[in-house]
Structures are given as C-alpha cells and as structure tokens.
Amino acid sequence: MRVFVTGGAGFIGSHTLVQLLRDNAQVTVFDNYTNSSPEALKRVRRLGQSDLTAVEGDICDTGALKTALEEARPDAVIHFAGLKAVGESAEKPLAYYQNNITGSLALLEAMDSVGCRRIVFSSSATVYDPHEQPPFTEEHRLGAINPYGRTKQFVEDIIRDWAAANTETSAAILRYFNPVGAHASGDIGEDPVGIPNNLVPYISRVAGGSLAQLQVFGGDYDTRDGTGERDYIHVEDLASAHLAALKHAMKTTGSETFNIGTGQGTTVLEMLKAFEKAAGRSIPYRITDRRPGDVAKSVADVSKATRVLGWQAQYTVDDMCSSAWNWQSRNPNGYDNAE
Ligand code: NAD
Ligand code: UFG
C-alpha cells in the first residue's frame, strides 16, 4: 500500500512511520519541519528497516502538495501536519486557522485532484465540551474552548462533508487522548521546542536535570488526589491505532470517528510517582494554581475503536514512563546535536 503522511517527522508521525514501514507500506512523508527534524526520519528508516521518500514542504503550498501527491499516487493519506500548542493558539489564532484549516482544505483538494479518497486524520479529545461528564463516547457533545481545539472541530466537519459528497470516500477521524512515551529503542520520541507545555515531557526534563521542579497545576480538583486526571496513551499504541484505522478505511466508505485512549485515568501525582519509579530518582514538585482552561478529568470510552477497528491499547503507564525516560536519557537534547 502507498501511504502519504503529512507531518510524519513529528512525535506521533515518526512512531507511526516505523510501524508502516514494518508493515511493508511505501511511504512518502510531507513535512515542513516547523516542529520536527529530518533526523527523526533518518532514525525511522533505521528502525523501520526500509526507505521512505521525504518531501520538505508546507501543506498550505498547494502547488508543492499537488506535485508531491502526483508523484506519490497514494492509496491513502494520514494527516498529522498541524500546529498543536493550546496556549500559542490563543495568542496566534489566525496562524492556527491558516495552518490547520487552510492546510487541511488544500490537502483534500490535492487528494481529489489525484483521485485519492482515503484519509486518517489526527483529531483530539480537546474537541469535547469540557462540561460533559467523562468517560467521553464519540457521541458526547463537542465544544472546544480554544482556537487549536476549534481547528480540529472544523476540520473534522470538513472531512465529514468531503466524505459525504463522494460515495467512494473513506475517512477515519481519530480523537487522541494524551499521547506520551517513546519507541522502545529510545531512538525516537517527543522533542518539544523550548520549555514543554505537557506533563510528561516536563517531568522528563525535571528528571533529566534540565528543569528544576514540576509545577502541579491545581491540587483541589474533584479527583482521587485533587490533581488533574487524564487518559494517557502510549505513542506505540497510538501508532498501531493508525494502522488499524487505515486498514478499516481501505475496506469501507463514509466517515467514522474513534476515541483513541486506554479508558483509564491517571492523575498528575500518579504519573509523577510512576515516572519516579521508571527513572529511579525523586522528582521535585510543588502544587500551584490551576492552569486556565484545564478540566478535572478527561477519559475516553474506547469501546467503539475496540469493536470496529479491533484495536486496543496494550501498554501501561509504567511502560509509558520507562520508554519516555529511556528516550530522554539517551537524547537529553532531543534530536539536536545528533551525530
Ligand atoms: P508534532 O508537532 O510533533 O508533529 C506535527 C508535524 O507536522 C511536525 O513534524 C510539523 O513540522 C508538521 N507540520 C506542522 N505544520 C505543517 C505544515 N503547514 N506543513 C507541513 N508540515 C507541517 O505533533 P504530534 O504530537 O506528532 O501531533 C500530530 C497531530 O496530532 C497534530 O495534528 C496534533 O494536533 C494532533 N494531536 C496531538 C496530540 C498530542 O498531545 N501530541 C493530541 C491530540 C492530537
Ligand atoms: N500539568 C501539570 N504541570 C505541567 C503540565 C501539565 O500539572 O507542567 C497537568 C495539567 O494541569 C493536566 C495534566 O497535567 O491536569 C495533563 O496536562 P497536559 O498539558 O499534558 O495535557 P492536556 O490534557 O492539557 O492536553 C493535551 C494536549 C492537547 C490535547 C489534549 C487531549 O496538550 O493538545 O491533551 O488530547 F488536545
């Protein structure tokens, strides 16, 4: 199968690429490296024991995108490319709408022009209305509360409309919960630019000594220990969900939306303890004010993915922490200074 992967050099994309290559897919990656490094693709080729075609380009550049798709002639597209920082999206909403929405429109148009009608799209749990009660099923009310989340909600709708307009089209929309962890080799992982916003990359840096202390955002939520509870999913499980979704999309038409998580919640303090165990060291922290926009609890109902895709997460929170720590300790500067 020929697969065209936008944003393939990023965190989730790189892990998915390894599994695609191992599954004998012919892969073209289209990425502008705005939040990633070509070094990740070098390592993906090694781990996947196969080559791939890498095209440097922006999904908003319709000409470059069409040319790349014409050359690749893919059976399907996995669309990871996007900007993803919630805080930044509130500061630069137009950049987010431009990149994530205009870029997705350009991609669908370019797919139409080469007759490619199958897509797997990276959506997010952030589309759910935070006032709804978890666990979230795919039927729960949507209501993103920041520009980033709204770009995901809009693109979901655009893809559903695109799929509805042509009977040969198939779209799998995956709503990821909280992806963490790294490949077991420690060769690829999450490499955020600057100070991480997300919990596990932040804890990793504290454990590695480049940041002094974790700030736990809020200790008075209505959860087991008062700290925020999330459904963390190992990036390797998330990668295998893409392969399952791709196979499903190849044999069906229409659009389907799937929650991709474990169905289990872990609090900030539970994650901290699991990471301390994985790293074999204590991690300093202090409880501070709540972070604006955070919810107490976000956990998936994953029964649809299990029932329809035959997919289920395999890895535990301990696996997530030990693989994240393995990546961090082998690559303290991420992909920078790689030989
Ligand atoms: P990432 O930033 O590591 O990867 C995104 C990739 O897209 C990067 O390689 C980046 O360079 C590329 N990219 C961005 N804009 C582009 C453009 N205009 N043209 C070409 N390439 C472009 O992020 P990730 O964590 O791997 O996330 C992948 C997708 O999953 C994103 O769409 C993100 O919004 C979504 N998602 C991520 C999370 C998460 O917590 N990591 C949760 C839910 C959804
Ligand atoms: N947290 C801290 N300290 C930190 C960072 C986070 O206490 O330094 C807490 C948060 O308050 C929250 C939990 O850790 O309770 C998880 O926070 P993250 O920032 O790691 O993840 P979020 O659930 O806020 O959001 C993430 C992505 C979103 C995505 C969402 C669902 O950032 O883009 O998961 O997929 F939409």
Image (cartoon, helix red, strand yellow):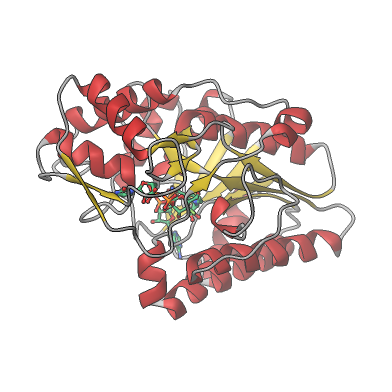
Q: Which quadrant of the structure image shows residue 291?
A: bottom left
**What residue is rendered at 46% in x and 52% in y?**
7
Q: Is residue 225 visible?
A: yes
Q: Name the residue furthest bottom.
A: 94
Quadrant the C terminus occupies: top left
State the image coordinates of residue 223 (x, y, percent, origin top left): 46, 41
State the image coordinates of residue 146 (x, y, percent, origin top left): 49, 69
Q: Which quadrant of the structure image shows residue 166?
A: bottom right
- State left or right for residue 253 relative to residue 270: right
Q: How many marks?
A: 0
Q: Which quadrant of the structure image shows residue 69?
A: bottom right
**What residue is rendered at 85% in x and 47% in y?**
253
Q: Is residue 271 above or below residue 58?
A: above
- Residues 218 and 205: in front is 218
Q: Is residue 198 above or below residue 231?
A: below
Q: Is residue 332 visible?
A: no
- Residues 204 and 18: in front is 204
- Residues 56 and 194: in front is 194
State the image coordinates of residue 203 (x, y, percent, origin top left): 24, 39
Q: Name the residue furthest right.
A: 167
**What residue is rendered at 68% in x and 60% in y?**
111
State the image coordinates of residue 125 (x, y, percent, origin top left): 57, 51
**What residue is rendered at 53% in x and 64% in y?**
149
- Residues 45 and 180: in front is 180
Quadrant the N terminus occupies: top right
